[in-house]
């Protein structure tokens, strides 16, 4: 399921409109211009992600704030996100890019917080929301409260999705932490999100396997142009669209694409579904467990094939294939190319 045919919780839309009204926006006029009926928002639990994206972009343009709805200290001038992207796409790996993004937040007008990367002892890395140098710890703690829950959540979502875009792969989260108690608007997220969600924690941030910090930056100035046509609001849409069952299954499977990749029964149990219900609901989303499994392995295969130190046999083993020949056949079926042909094409 793509973003174009997906839906998000209407709670995201109501939060956006509430924030826009606080900034003095004529919300009714904006809704009319976008042909959005208020009943679509008030009388339904789900809302079109496409319309949400259009509304988000409209609000950003009206208030002239590129980080509207995220944690900032004022208007972030339009064009700032482009400059930040240009400063990180030439980095060697995700760790260097994350460090540079943090440095950019320190000097760009409008930011009060920035992402900080920390490598933990348990094989995980943590992206944590911290204050810029000019903001005191006392003032920072006043921002990290439940009244700003939606802004904090949106900021973390954008940081995560941006990292995924930079490296051209899904980066499964192990956990998400918030410094406040669970607000009502987070209930659905807390109950359905595959990663562990913790509240009343000493920080706001998320954790993932530290090996992803070594991922190469695969984007370029050419791919950046297409990306910026929708940035940054589509990053929020993509995070919100994770509420679909197929994306929940994909997130679970992406955590381990080796021999230990869980089967359909294990995934169904983790999602508190029967195997029959899992298959039926995936079919309603025009996909299947096997198709999602293949997509996850293909995504991992492409990532590994871009690492010159890994042989095709190494990659086959990492992906849980009994023999390299089985990996060759599967990759040819998925892409129409052998692993060697793919590598040669990428080197040209």
Image (tube, helix red, strand yellow):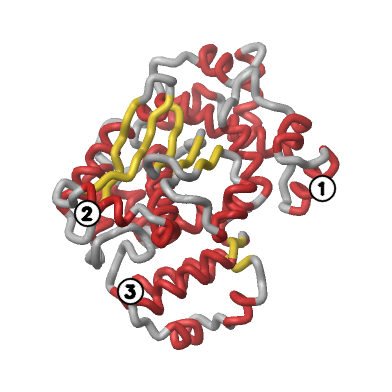
Label 1 vs 2, first from the N-terminus:
2
Instruction: State the residue at coordinates (82%, 47%).
Output: 280
Q: Is residue 288 left or right of residue 12?
A: right
Q: Nearer the viewer, mark 2 or mark 3?
A: 3
Indicate the position of residue 187 as horizontal and vertical percent values.
60, 54
Q: Are marks 1 and 2 in contact (CB under 8 Å)?
A: no
Indicate the position of residue 165 as horizontal and vertical percent values.
41, 44
- Tell me the element at label 2: helix
Q: Which residue is mark 3?
A: 61
Indicate the position of residue 72 as horizontal and vertical percent values.
28, 59
Indicate the position of residue 93 as horizontal and vertical percent values.
31, 31
Q: Quadrant of the C terminus?
A: top left
Picture layout, residue 205 above or below residue 324: below
Q: Which residue is mark 1?
A: 280
Q: Which residue is mark 2?
A: 83
Is residue 336 visible to the viewer in this orientation of the structure? Answer: no
Label 1 vs 3, first from the N-terminus:
3
Tell me which corner region of the image, top left, top right, bottom left or bottom right, holds residue 309.
top left
Q: Are marks 1 and 3 in contact (CB under 8 Å)?
A: no
Label 2 vs 3, first from the N-terminus:
3
Q: Nearer the viewer, residue 212 or 85?
A: 212
Q: Nearer the viewer, residue 300 or 273?
A: 273
Instruction: State the residue at coordinates (45%, 28%).
Output: 209
Query: How many residues crowd around disc 1 within 10 Å: few (fewer than 14), some, or many (20 or more)?
Result: some
- Tell me the element at label 1: helix
**Cα distance between the residues tagged 2 and 3:** 18 Å
**Cα distance between the residues tagged 1 and 2:** 45 Å
Tell me which corner region of the image, top left, top right, bottom left or bottom right, holds residue 330.
top right
Picture layout, residue 346 above or below residue 182: above
Is residue 214 visible to the viewer in this orientation of the structure? Answer: yes
């Amino acid at each position: 399921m793509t973003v174009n045919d997906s839906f998000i919780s209407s709670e995201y839309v109501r939060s956006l409109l509430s924030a826009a009204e606080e900034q003095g926006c004529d919300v009714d006029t904006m809704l009319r211009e976008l042909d959005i009926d208020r009943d679509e928002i008030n009388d339904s639990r789900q809302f079109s992600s496409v319309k949400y994206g259009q509304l988000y972009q409209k609000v950003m343009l009206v208030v002239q704030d590129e980080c509207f709805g995220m944690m900032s200290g004022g208007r972030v001038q339009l064009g700032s996100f482009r400059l930040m992207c240009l400063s990180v796409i030439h980095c060697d790996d995700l760790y260097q890019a994350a460090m540079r993004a943090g440095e950019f937040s320190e000097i760009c007008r409008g930011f009060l917080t920035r992402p900080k990367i920390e490598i933990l002892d348990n094989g995980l890395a943590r992206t944590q929301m911290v204050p810029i140098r000019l903001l005191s710890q006392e003032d920072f703690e006043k921002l990290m409260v439940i009244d700003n829950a939606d802004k904090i959540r949106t900021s973390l979502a954008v940081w995560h999705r941006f990292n995924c875009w930079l490296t051209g792969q899904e980066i499964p989260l192990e956990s998400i932490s918030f410094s406040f108690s669970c607000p009502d608007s987070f209930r659905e997220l807390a109950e359905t999100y595959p990663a562990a969600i913790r509240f009343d924690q000493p920080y706001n941030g998320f954790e993932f396997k530290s090996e992803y910090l070594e991922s190469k930056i695969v984007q370029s100035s050419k791919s950046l142009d297409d990306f910026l046509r929708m940035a940054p609001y589509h990053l929020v849409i993509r995070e919100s669209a994770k509420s679909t069952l197929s994306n929940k299954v994909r997130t679970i499977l992406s955590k381990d694409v080796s021999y230990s990749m869980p089967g359909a029964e294990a995934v169904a149990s983790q999602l508190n579904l029967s195997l029959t219900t899992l298959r039926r609901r995936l079919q309603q989303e025009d996909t299947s467990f096997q198709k999602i499994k293949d997509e996850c392995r293909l995504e991992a295969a492409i990532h590994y094939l871009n690492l010159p130190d890994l042989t095709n046999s190494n990659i086959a083993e990492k992906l849980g294939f009994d023999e390299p020949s089985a990996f060759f056949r599967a990759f040819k079926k998925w892409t129409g190319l052998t692993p060697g042909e793919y590598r040669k094409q990428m080197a040209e």
